[in-house]
Image (tube, grey):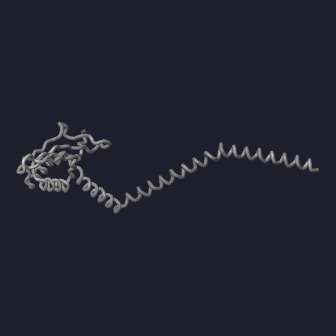
């Protein structure tokens, strides 16, 4: 009787193991990809729900007003850092007037190269205008000039500067600066 029971249990165990292997195989082939597809479908559904909610919100007049206000604020903030081509031409005069206010000696400003606007990496709408400035004056005049440039809008970036002490005690220090400013590119270029 024990032998029959053992054979019966072995046969039943092999059938269960075989069924288990078949079920795992069916699960891996049929049900697992379906669960991934279902998960991706739920993600897409959530994205579409978010898009729908955003579209409904933008149809609201208050939301439109708020978005227009936000865009205007961002444009004003951008104008603090970027100038247009007309402002770029006026920038030379602004820097010259800052130099005159600080009473620097023999002030000169010139564009660094023949290019009017240099390309900024990974930026399609903004370029960089570079210029070299040189003048004579005391360290105090240099500091006041630099401070005025830092407060200027649009922002003027000081890439580098050098100060060379005058040969004689009564001679002014020679100061040269490399400046740059962001310029909005024309849409044509």
- Residue 126 lies left or right of residue 141; in this view the side is right
Query: Percent position (x, y) of residue 20?
Result: 74, 47
Q: Seen from this angle, which residue lies furthest bottom?
A: 62
Q: Residue 176 occupies which quadrant of the picture?
A: top left
Task: Give the camera-side residue of 140 and 158.
Answer: 140
Query: Percent position (x, y) of residue 141?
Result: 12, 54
Task: Give the camera-side residue of 135 and 89.
Answer: 135
Q: Seen from this angle, which residue lies furthest front?
A: 168
Residue 133, relative to residue 139: is it above or below? Answer: above
Query: Percent position (x, y) of residue 93?
Result: 11, 49
- Residue 184 lies left or right of residue 175; in this view the side is right
Q: Residue at x 28, y 42 (%)?
A: 120
- Residue 47 lies left or right of residue 73; in this view the side is right
Residue 148, relative to residue 33: is it above or below? Answer: below
Picture quarter with the C terminus: top left
Q: Residue at x 19, y 37 (%)?
A: 115
Q: How many marks?
A: 0
Task: Give the camera-side residue of 116 and 135.
Answer: 135
- Residue 120 lies left or right of residue 93; in this view the side is right
Q: Seen from this angle, which residue lies furthest left?
A: 170
Q: Seen from this angle, which residue lies furthest right?
A: 1
């Amino acid at each position: 009787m024990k032998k029959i029971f053992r054979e019966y249990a072995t046969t039943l165990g092999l059938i269960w193991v075989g069924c288990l292997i078949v079920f795992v195989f069916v699960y891996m082939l049929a049900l697992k990809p379906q669960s991934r597809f279902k998960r991706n479908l739920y993600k897409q559904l959530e994205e579409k729900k978010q898009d729908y909610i955003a579209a409904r919100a933008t149809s609201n007049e208050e939301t439109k007003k708020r978005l227009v206000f936000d865009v205007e604020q961002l444009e004003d903030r951008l104008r603090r850092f970027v100038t247009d081509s007309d402002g770029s031409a006026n920038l030379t005069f602004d820097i010259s007037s800052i130099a005159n206010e600080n009473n620097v000696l023999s002030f000169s400003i010139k564009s660094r190269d023949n290019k009017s606007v240099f390309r900024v990496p990974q930026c399609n709408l903004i370029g960089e205008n570079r210029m070299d400035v040189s003048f004579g004056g005391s360290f105090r005049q240099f500091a006041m000039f630099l401070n005025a440039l830092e407060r200027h809008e649009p922002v003027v970036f000081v890439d580098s500067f050098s100060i060379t002490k005058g040969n004689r005690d009564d001679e002014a220090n020679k100061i040269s600066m490399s400046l740059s400013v962001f310029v909005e590119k024309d849409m044509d270029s």
